[in-house]
Image: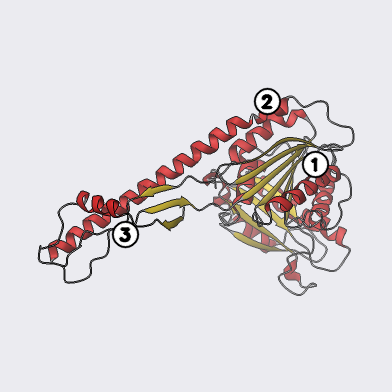
């Protein structure tokens, strides 16, 4: 946790008290006067960038899982919005979490001006060490107070009770297109009131009954989107849904079925909300033949090296498939998804649980070479240490 330090104004009385508490004054002890002076008090504040989590659901059955997700990923300075899809959509929750709690500690001992005795230097070093211990204790106290404030805020929202009161889902509102439109409209309103302070730390979670519909281009520009379905999606509809989301401007898009665990989903959301805190432990490029999703022998050798990391507790592998530019965009999305899915199947066949694998097809995007180059026909395996939290 980095700290933001604000210098408070000098208060004469506080400086005098701090000098007395530090021990005997060094004035007249053979060194310069004022050796026990301190700087102004220091205000420590946890440095947390604002973030936004928007969830859209149409079914009360998703209530417990959604309430658990919000509780597991809540952080300071987060805007949380939960909507029920419909025309118009119904706002279930719209609230901002508390900002980090500041803590004020005594000022740092002033650096001696020179000419000190060895005793005075040792005394200064002792006082400086004690101040660093106070600063560490202050940071811990601030983090504890912030967690308590966020927990109290969450309890006050009553998310699970509110979701439990939802009526029957509106007909035809649980599709990918319908819920995406609800999310895009809500985020546009958020931008009008809060500006672009969230940056790329905006996560959309859609609880969809159907992966159908066409999304307008630019509807989800820059957003991280996670789609959760009550059924295990086949490769074709999952890749088509990802293609729609990425084509609508989503920065990333993942489609998860009921095999995804609550911890895995919470870890992915936390990583997206934090952005800068997202660890990328291993990134392994795997090459394919043109138009093919079959693993080459060299790819198998490289993927085998990842087993040790994948078997560690609390990690999830996000498997990103890519294609080169020849061919229609839709076909490239489908091909890139099949490449990622084949890598996932390779891992599962060797004992890696499917719940630890997330498959994403990106089509012919994020090119690392000229468009037709075989270097673009790849899969990148990114291992995220989700157990560490945000």
Residue 42: x %, y % from top left: 38, 54
Residue 160 percent location from the top left of the image? 67, 28
Residue 12 visible = yes
Q: Which mark is residue 161?
A: 2
Q: Determine crowd level at label 2: few under 14, some 14-19, many 20+ residues with C-alpha closer than 10 A.
A: few
Residue designated by label 3: 39
Distance from label 1 to label 2 (Cα)? 29 Å
Mark 3 neighbour density, 10 Å: few (under 14) some (14–19) many (20 or more): some
The residue closer to the viewer here, 170 or 294, is 170
* Of labels 3 and 1, the one closer to you: 3
Where is 92 relative to 126, above or below? Answer: above
Q: Quadrant of residue 60?
A: top right
Name which quarter of the figure residue 109 lies in. bottom left
Alpha carbon distance from label 3 to label 1: 61 Å
Horizontal side of residue 1 vs 295, given as left or right: left
Numbered disc 1: secondary structure:
loop
Q: Which mark is residue 233?
A: 1
Measured as percent of width and height from the top left, residue 130 is found at: 27, 52
Type of colouring: secondary structure
Do labels 3 and 1 touch, CB within 8 Å? no
Compute the Cα span from label 3 to label 2.
50 Å
Viewer-side label of 1, 2: 2
Q: Earlier in the sequence, mark 1 or mark 2?
A: 2
Relative vertical location of residue 128 with respect to residue 167 in this rendering, above or below: below
């Amino acid at each position: 946790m980095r700290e933001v330090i604000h210098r408070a104004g000098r208060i004469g009385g506080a400086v005098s008290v701090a000098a007395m508490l530090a021990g005997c004054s060094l004035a007249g002890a053979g060194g310069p006067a004022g050796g026990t002076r301190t700087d102004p008090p220091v205000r420590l504040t946890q440095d947390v960038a604002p973030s936004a989590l928007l969830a859209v659901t149409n079914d009360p059955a998703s209530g417990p899982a959604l309430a658990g997700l919000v509780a597991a990923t809540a952080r300071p300075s987060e805007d949380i919005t939960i909507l029920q899809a419909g025309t118009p959509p119904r706002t279930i929750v719209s609230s901002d979490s508390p900002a980090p709690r500041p803590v004020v500690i005594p000022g740092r001992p002033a650096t001696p001006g020179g000419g000190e005795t060895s005793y005075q230097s040792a005394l200064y070093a002792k006082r400086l060490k004690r101040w660093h211990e106070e600063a560490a204790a202050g940071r811990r106290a601030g983090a504890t107070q912030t967690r308590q404030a966020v927990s109290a805020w969450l309890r006050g929202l009553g998310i699970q009770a509110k979701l439990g009161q939802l009526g029957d889902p509106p007909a035809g509102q649980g599709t990918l297109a319908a819920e995406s439109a609800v999310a895009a409209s809500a985020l546009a309103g958020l931008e009008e009131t809060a500006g672009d302070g969230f940056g790329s730390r905006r996560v959309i979670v859609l609880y969809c009954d159907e992966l159908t519909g066409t999304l307008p281009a630019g509807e989800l520009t820059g957003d991280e989107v996670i789609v959760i379905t009550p059924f295990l999606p086949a490769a074709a509809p999952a890749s088509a849904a990802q293609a729609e989301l990425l084509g609508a401007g989503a920065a990333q898009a993942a489609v998860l079925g009921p095999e995804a665990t609550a911890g895995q989903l919470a870890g992915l959301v936390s990583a997206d909300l934090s952005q800068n805190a997202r660890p990328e432990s291993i990134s392994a490029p795997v090459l394919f033949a043109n138009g093919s999703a079959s693993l080459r022998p060299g790819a198998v050798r490289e993927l085998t090296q990842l087993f040790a990391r994948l078997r560690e507790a609390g990690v999830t592998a996000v498997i990103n498939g890519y294609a080169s530019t020849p061919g229609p965009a839709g076909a490239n999305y489908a091909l890139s998804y099949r490449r990622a899915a084949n890598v996932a199947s390779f891992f599962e066949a060797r004992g890696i649980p499917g719940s630890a694998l997330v498959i994403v097809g990106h089509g012919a995007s994020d090119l690392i070479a000229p468009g037709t180059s075989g270097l673009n026909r790849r899969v990148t395996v990114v291992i995220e240490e989700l157990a560490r939290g945000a």
